[in-house]
Amino acid sequence: MLAYYRRTLQQIITGVLFLFALAPLSVFAATTVDLTPAKTASFNLISIKTVPSTPGPNEPVTITLKSFSTDLSSSKITWYINKNLTKEGIGETTFITNTGNTGESIDIDVVILTNQGEEIKKHITLAPMEVDVLWEAQTYTPPFYKGKALPSYQSIVKMSAIPRHNATSSNPLAFAYKWTLDRTSGAGEGFGKSSTLVRATWPDSAINVGVEVSVPGTEVVGTKEISISSVDPILNFYQNTPLLGTRFDHTMLGANTPSGQLNLRVVPYFFSTDNLKNNELVYELKIGNATTPIGLNPMNITVPRMSPSGETKTISLHIQNPKHIIQEAAATTQVTFTPQQ
């Protein structure tokens, strides 16, 4: 009887173990899924570049595709201009076209079909804008001077951008501006900032001032860069007569006069106007070998006759801006007093 119960218990245990062995198989059979990955497009690591980067109106532009992750040389590439098929072929990574008129947008679409069957799309808009840049040196020139005030060392130069969009002179306040100095340092930026101030550099050297103008919320961008050279200030003498006033028609290199004195007008071309107006310039005047004090108006010099007989005097003047010590100039002239009868 004991042997009978023992055999029965072993049969029960064997049956339970058999059921546990089958259970995992049934679970896996019910939850098995297809792990084969679906075909998806690769990461869109394709760059599109234009040369020039901001083309102007009616200008040829080269558009190039580049990628380190997609084999473009074996891909079919199709180019569209304003939705019109323009070019297609295997490995056609370069496309050349022309921009339109000022403010005229051109949509460039590119469809790339790789040899793995992936389709990648790129888009770029060419919207040229014309930008003019004007500059005005804040340096001194006399009234009615026909030339342009030129920048000297550390003088202030005002830059003004004039963007043209939609073939007209647009309101400068409607654009965003980004100014650069020598292509690196920022010279100001912001919405409506159509002008900025920069300082000139050493004489016979130049600064490069650039501006990027854009229409907020669009792809319309225009750029302009100009080079501005600095000069040394110039100091000239002019004769000042009672009837004709200052003779600006010619520089006085020497003069003969029978009168009792000679009045000279001094013109310090291209010195900083702010320092000139604030009387910050330093004047050193010599008549002959004697240093002579400057009067209340340093631009007017009176040379007196010292003897009734004939005599010649050398007048020399040196002007320096102590705020910018390299901003200086000197001039010399001679005055001959003829004998009085």
Image (tube, rainbow, N blue to C red):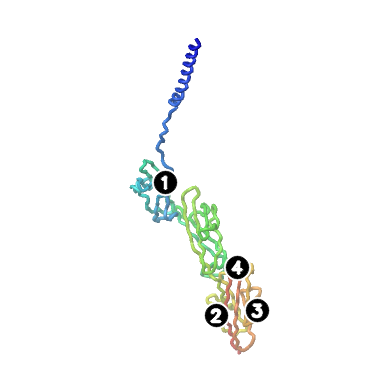
101 displayed left or right of 174: left
Q: Nearer the viewer, residue 276 or 263?
A: 276
194 displayed left or right of 120: right
Q: Position of residue 174 (x, y in %)?
A: 52, 52
Residue type for callout 1 = Ser
The alpha-carbon separation of the residues under discs 1 and 3 comes to 79 Å
Residue type for callout 2 = Leu
The alpha-carbon separation of the residues under discs 4 and 2 comes to 28 Å
- Work out whether mark 3 precedes mark 4 in sequence or the reverse, and give the earlier one: 3
Mark 2, residues whose alpha carbon is within 10 Å: few (<14), some, or many (≥20)? some
Which residue, given by chain and number where applicable, does mark 2 sit on?
Answer: 253
Residue type for callout 4 = His
Labels 2 & 3 near each other (Cβ < 8 A): no
Mark 1, residues whose alpha carbon is within 10 Å: few (<14), some, or many (≥20)? few
Secondary structure at badge 2 equals loop
Residue 324, label in figure: 4
Residue type for callout 3 = Thr
Secondary structure at badge 3 equals strand
Residue 295, label in figure: none
The alpha-carbon separation of the residues under discs 2 and 3 comes to 20 Å
Q: Nearer the viewer, residue 61 or 115?
A: 115
The alpha-carbon separation of the residues under discs 2 and 1 comes to 74 Å
Q: Residue at x 53, y 64 (%)?
A: 136
Mark 3, residues whose alpha carbon is within 10 Å: few (<14), some, or many (≥20)? few
Q: Position of residue 291 (x, y in %)?
A: 65, 79
Labels 1 & 3 near each other (Cβ < 8 A): no
User: Taking 221 as reference, is 292 above or below it?
Assistant: below
Which residue, given by chain and number where applicable, does mark 3 sit on?
Answer: 292
User: Taking 289 as reference, is 176 above or below it?
Assistant: above
Which residue, given by chain and number where applicable, does mark 1 sit on?
Answer: 69
